[in-house]
């Protein structure tokens, strides 16, 4: 009897899933035909393609549509193709799409669950209000000397390495040293030791291998599983170690009346001024730098250096700007000077366009939204985007659309010079847009720029033949990471 009931339940579930695949057709929304059970994400489910590549294929297939209806397994999902619509959803109608799709419960994961990226509703808003003052241009300038010191030591470290280097590993050491000194008030020792304790913590936190990432992948494919599977992104031993570091450092500073110009001091001030801001909150927001300041920044930086190595004319032009800045400032690079370096900014923007650390931004409809089609589009009638519908902003596809970027697969920093960046604002979204844009983008961008400036001043760089081309992205990782390492040759400039 139980077997019969189970078979009936399975058959009913399969029937209603199949019936659900008519969801977008009933609303007149174009989209690819789904495959039973997996919807339109079969190749990602089979670990053949990254979601960035998969959304890119869908994006290019429906060039006459402003939005495309797909299915993540049985979940109706929208892929946006139009910058004007993206502007509406991220800014004008933000309250209808307030949350990101991926949510971590802070009762399950006390650290990552407090990260604004993974928070929702009022939790996100209150956290954002608390943290925003710590990321102003004034506060970033405050910690700039720390980044400058790490950059100088970075050059010395590269000088001691083999000529051919795994550039991601190199950039990870640089950004992790910055996170250590700026967010945790410690020396991460990534230039002195091969495998220091802080690097071990970071590696475990972000390792692309393990059940944690399988869970993340499954939930990105089948959002409904989030209600069943509880995700703890932060391993327990990492949580304990980071908490101990923060607790001990804050106690030492308090006992010895030490004030240091870093983010930990800002967090400490929050603890003093807000009674409900605990040591758990302090640890959580310092740990948030692993995302903004360590992993995503190292990905962006290593792609930036790769593109400079692959495009020697651009590298030479950037070196001229960098050398001029150093020469005019007694062989230093002040904060104000790096802000004026137009070609450095343009080249970094171009690297972010080609290789955004997040291949897509996944939003969630939090309040019913009526979509009204334009008179000339293929959708002919209005329909309601229902609360709970995932909405995908396919950054990788948008960034390589020839409609917005001429010769989109080529590295051309000039396209971002002379204020041109603003003309494609909602087609160029490496940090997101609107109230939920990346809070740490100033810090992340600054550390990449100063690190690259010091490298280009001191070294000529070339792509080594060990690098596998064309670059293909890892389908098992939630960020835009190459399947195979990128290898760069460094030649010291005498």
Image (spheres, grey):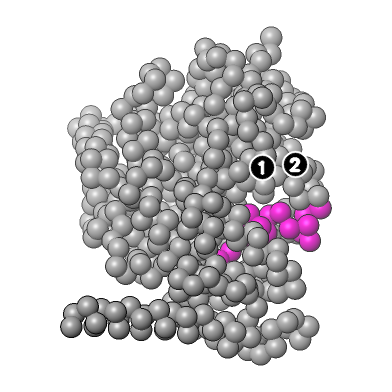
Q: Is residue 401 magenta?
A: yes
Q: Are marks 1 and 2 in contact (CB under 8 Å)?
A: yes
Q: Nearer the viewer, residue 120 or 31?
A: 31
What x and y, as percent, mark residue 117? 43, 57
Q: Relative to 269, is 292 on the left or the right?
A: right
Residue 348 in sight in this render: no
Q: Residues within 10 Å of mark 1 (few under 14, many from 20)?
A: many
Residue 465 in sight in this render: yes
Q: Relative to 428, is 192 on the left or the right?
A: left
Q: Relative to 197, is 353 on the left or the right?
A: right
- Residue visible at 70% across and 66% down? 61
**Segment tinted magenta in the rendering:** 390-406
The residue where tag 1 is placed is 351
CA gap between label 1 and label 2 equals 7 Å
Q: Secondary structure at mark 1?
A: helix
Q: Is residue 300 above or below residue 320?
A: below
The residue where tag 2 is placed is 411
Q: Quadrant of the C terminus?
A: top right
What x and y, as percent, mark residue 469? 67, 36
Q: Residues within 10 Å of mark 2 (few under 14, many from 20)?
A: some
Q: Is residue 436 magenta?
A: no
**Of marks 1 and 2, which one's residue comes earlier in the chain?**
1
- Residue visible at 23% across and 40% down? 237
Q: Secondary structure at mark 2?
A: loop
Q: Nearer the viewer, residue 136 or 454?
A: 454
């Amino acid at each position: 009897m139980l077997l019969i009931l189970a078979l009936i339940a399975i058959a009913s579930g399969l029937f209603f899933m199949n019936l659900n695949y008519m969801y977008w057709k009933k609303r007149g929304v174009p989209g690819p035909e789904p495959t039973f059970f997996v919807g339109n994400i079969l190749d990602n489910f089979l670990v053949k393609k990254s979601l960035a590549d998969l959304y890119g294929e869908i994006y290019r297939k429906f060039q006459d549509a402003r939005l495309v209806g797909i299915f993540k397994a049985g979940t109706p999902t929208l892929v946006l193709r139009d910058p004007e619509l993206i502007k509406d959803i991220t800014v004008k109608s933000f309250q209808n799409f307030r949350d990101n799709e991926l949510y971590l419960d802070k009762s399950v994961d006390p650290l990552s669950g407090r990260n604004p990226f993974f928070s929702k509703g009022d939790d996100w808003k209150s956290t954002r209000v608390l943290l925003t003052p710590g990321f102003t241009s004034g506060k970033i300038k405050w910690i700039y000397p720390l980044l400058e010191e790490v950059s100088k030591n970075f050059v010395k470290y590269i000088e001691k390495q083999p000529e051919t280097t795994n550039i991601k590993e190199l950039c990870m050491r640089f950004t992790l040293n910055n996170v250590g000194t700026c967010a945790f008030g410690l020396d991460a020792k990534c230039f002195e030791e091969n495998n220091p304790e802080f690097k071990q913590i970071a590696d475990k936190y972000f390792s692309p291998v393990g059940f944690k990432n399988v869970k993340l992948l499954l939930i990105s494919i089948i959002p409904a599983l989030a209600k069943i599977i509880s995700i703890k992104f932060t391993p327990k031993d990492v949580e304990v170690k980071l908490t101990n570091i923060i607790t001990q450092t804050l106690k030492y500073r308090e006992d010895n009346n030490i004030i240091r110009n870093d983010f930990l001091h800002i967090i400490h001030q929050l603890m003093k001024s807000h009674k409900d801001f605990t040591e758990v909150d302090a640890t959580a927001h310092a740990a948030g730098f692993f995302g903004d300041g360590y992993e995503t920044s190292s990905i962006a930086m290593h792609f930036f250096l790769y593109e400079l190595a692959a495009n020697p004319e651009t590298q030479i032009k950037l070196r001229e700007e960098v050398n001029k800045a150093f020469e005019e400032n007694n062989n230093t690079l002040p904060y104000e000077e790096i802000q004026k370096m137009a070609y450095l900014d343009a080249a970094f923007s171009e690297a972010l366009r080609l290789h955004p650390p997040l291949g897509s931004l996944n939003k969630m409809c939090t309040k019913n939204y009526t979509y009204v089609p334009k008179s000339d589009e293929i959708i002919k009638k209005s329909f309601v985007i229902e609360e709970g519908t995932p909405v995908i902003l396919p950054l990788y596809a948008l960034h390589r659309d020839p409609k917005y970027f001429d010769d989109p697969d080529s590295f051309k920093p000039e396209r971002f010079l002379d204020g041109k960046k603003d003309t494609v604002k909602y087609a160029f979204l490496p940090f997101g847009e609107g109230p939920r844009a990346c809070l740490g983008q100033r810090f992340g961008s600054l550390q990449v720029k100063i690190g690259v400036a010091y490298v280009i001043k001191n070294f000529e760089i070339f792509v080594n033949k060990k690098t596998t081309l064309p670059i293909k992205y890892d389908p098992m990782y939630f960020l835009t990471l190459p399947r195979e390492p990128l290898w760069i040759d460094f030649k010291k400039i005498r």
